[in-house]
Image: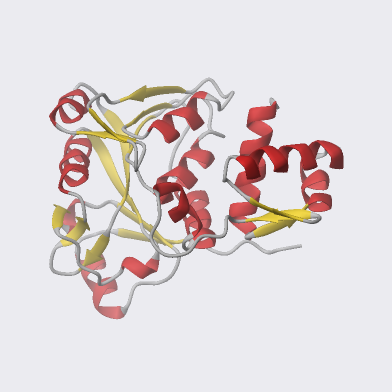
Amino acid sequence: MTPSQRRQEIVAIIRQRGRATVDELAERLDISRETIRRDLTRLAQSGLVHKFHGGASLPMTTGEGPFRARMSKHALEKARIAVEAARLVAPGETVFVDTGSTTIYFAEQLAKVEGLTVITNSTEIARIIDHSGKGCRAFMLGGEYHSGNHQTVGSMAIAQARLFRAHHCFLAIGALDVRTGVMDYNIEEAQLARAMIEQAETLTILVDSSKFGAIASFEVCPLHCIDNLVCDAEPDSKLRAALEENNVMVRVAQAEEQN
């Protein structure tokens, strides 16, 4: 494991658990406590963790902030969703993944799968896949760059997405309801998501339950387009019935037992 991969694993553990001590991380990764302390210092300087005496936790953020700040919102739920969603992917497959805090958690799980081809508009997801050490390839869709979300969007990104065919499309979303289906708050992200869906054999939606029944401004696709919905909690009876009627497989991610 390279230092970069090790730090990525440390961040993943802290996101899954909310916090971790130096002793826990050293035992989990089978490396020295001094190395863990140095890694936590580097990660804290980058804003990826909050370091405290003897360990580290998720970054402390308040209100609406930059994209990285949103990573700590519903962090444990997103981490569980990512683990469950990654079970749908087999080695050697081709996967579309769009920008989102949930899909970054998911990319960290994808990076453990051998020989994937991942097409994304997220510079952070491309970086994670490129550093996987599992023989994976990352293709970055070109277009207008938005630094706030570390993503590319626009007509160029859409045109390039249509050059690929994929086994899977995995999307993070803004909202989900019975009437409209999948929605997003950004029109350019919604347009690119639709292009990814068109080029993939299956569509999997990654969504934490806070978005059930919410409404966002732009439609992405109706419920019948979804093959799998991976979430952290059961939808309410009305939404569950609509998903079943549209043959959507609902996969509820289970919390991991803590030692």
Is 219 displayed left or right of 100 in the figure?
A: left
Q: Quadrant of the C terminus?
A: bottom right
Is 90 displayed left or right of 18 in the figure?
A: left
Residue occupying the point 85% across, 39% down = 34
Given residues 19 and 183, the one toward you in this image is 19
Is 181 displayed left or right of 3 in the figure?
A: left
Q: Quadrant of the N terminus?
A: top right
Is residue 112 placed above or below 162 in the rendered structure?
below
Is residue 181 placed above or below 82 in the rendered structure?
below
- Does residue 221 appear in the picture of this structure? no
**Residue 233 appears at what percent x and percent y?**
43, 70
**Residue 37 appears at what percent x and percent y?**
79, 42
- The part of the image, by quadrant, that contains residue 123 is top left
**Residue 227 appears at what percent x and percent y?**
28, 51
**Residue 137 appears at what percent x and percent y?**
44, 21
- The part of the image, by quadrant, that contains residue 36 is top right
Is 48 displayed left or right of 10 in the figure?
A: left
Residue occupying the point 27% across, 58% down = 174
Residue occupying the point 62% across, 49% down = 49
Given residues 141 and 179, the one toward you in this image is 141
